[in-house]
Image (tube, rainbow, N blue to C red):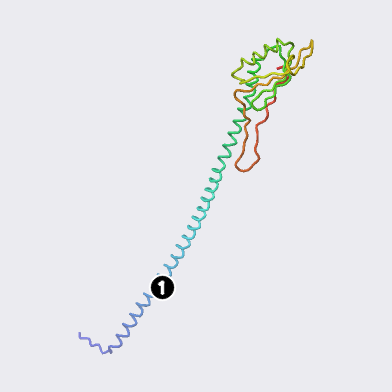
Amino acid sequence: MLKINLLPTYIYEKRKVKQTALVFAVLFVGVVAGMMAWNLSLGAKKTELTAQVADMQQKANEVKAIEAQATAEEQRIPVIQGKVQFIENVMQYNLQYPKLYEELAKYTYSRIMYASVDPSGGQFKIAAHARSLGDCGRYLLNMYRASHLFSGVSIDGVPGWPSQNAQSGQGFDFNVTCNLVQPVAQPAYTPGGGAPAASAPHTEPPPPGM
């Protein structure tokens, strides 16, 4: 059957225009929806990145704080080492005089009585009592024999010497000065932070009659 289209051409053009407009409208809506979705995605990514940056900044601050603490602790090490060394020196110092007293006792004649033994610098200053000149002589010879302890020994107050202090029938008092071969240095601690220096405790001399 033969069909004859009697409609004007512009009617079909209007339809095409409408169809094209519809297609562009759909495309526009799609583009706008895509842009909105992309914008939302960018916003979420920005929020995530901002949170990550804030977290990284916090961790960086924590690392800096730890580094500062570590530096402070490292700076304290020399002070702590100085204190430890000082304590060790004090312990050694406190043992030196008892050893010297023990050695002194070995070379002290049994008939000699000590009133006092005063460690002063590199010396022992001894106040003693002898019953006779013979006892004092034997004591002095013993002191001379202790050459590993004393580099020199001097005595005064013996009867017949320029300074006489004889007590007839009861013996006499005399003084002895012994120079140590190895003087005992009292340790001192001088911290770098400007704190007052501490010194070792003084070792008391033995009681009379050593």
Q: In the rendering, at what x and y percent does residue 98 appear? A: 64, 22
52 left or right of 28 in image:
right
Task: Name the residue located 52 percent from the left edge and 48 percent from the top edge.
Answer: 67
x and y percent of residue 103 in the render? Answer: 63, 18
Label 1, secondary structure: give it.
helix
Q: Amino acid at mark 1?
A: Val
Which residue is farthest front? 162
Out of 93 and 16, give the one closest to the viewer: 93
Q: Give residue 201's quadrant in the image.
A: top right
Q: How many callouts does the rendering have?
A: 1
Q: Quadrant of the N terminus?
A: bottom left
User: Which residue is at a point 52% across and 51% down the rendered structure image?
Assistant: 64
Relative vertical location of residue 66 with respect to residue 30 in this rendering, above or below: above
Residue 200 x/y as whole percent: 65, 31
Residue 25 image point, x, y percent:
38, 77
Q: Determine whether 110 is above or below 39 in the image.
A: above
Residue plotted at (67% across, 27% down) = 120
Q: Quadrant of residue 45?
A: bottom left
Report whether 30 appears left or right of 200: left
Q: Report the side of 141 relative to 25 (left or right).
A: right
Q: Is residue 118 above or below residue 20?
A: above
The image shows residue 10, relative to residue 141, as above or below, that is: below
Q: Residues within 10 Å of mark 1 (few under 14, many from 20)?
A: few
Observer-nearest of 75 and 105: 105
Nearest the eye: 38 or 52: 52
| Residue under the point 41% across and 70% down | 35
- Tell me the residue that label 1 is attached to: 32
Q: Quadrant of the C terminus?
A: top right
Q: Quadrant of residue 108?
A: top right
* Image position of 27 (left or right of 76): left
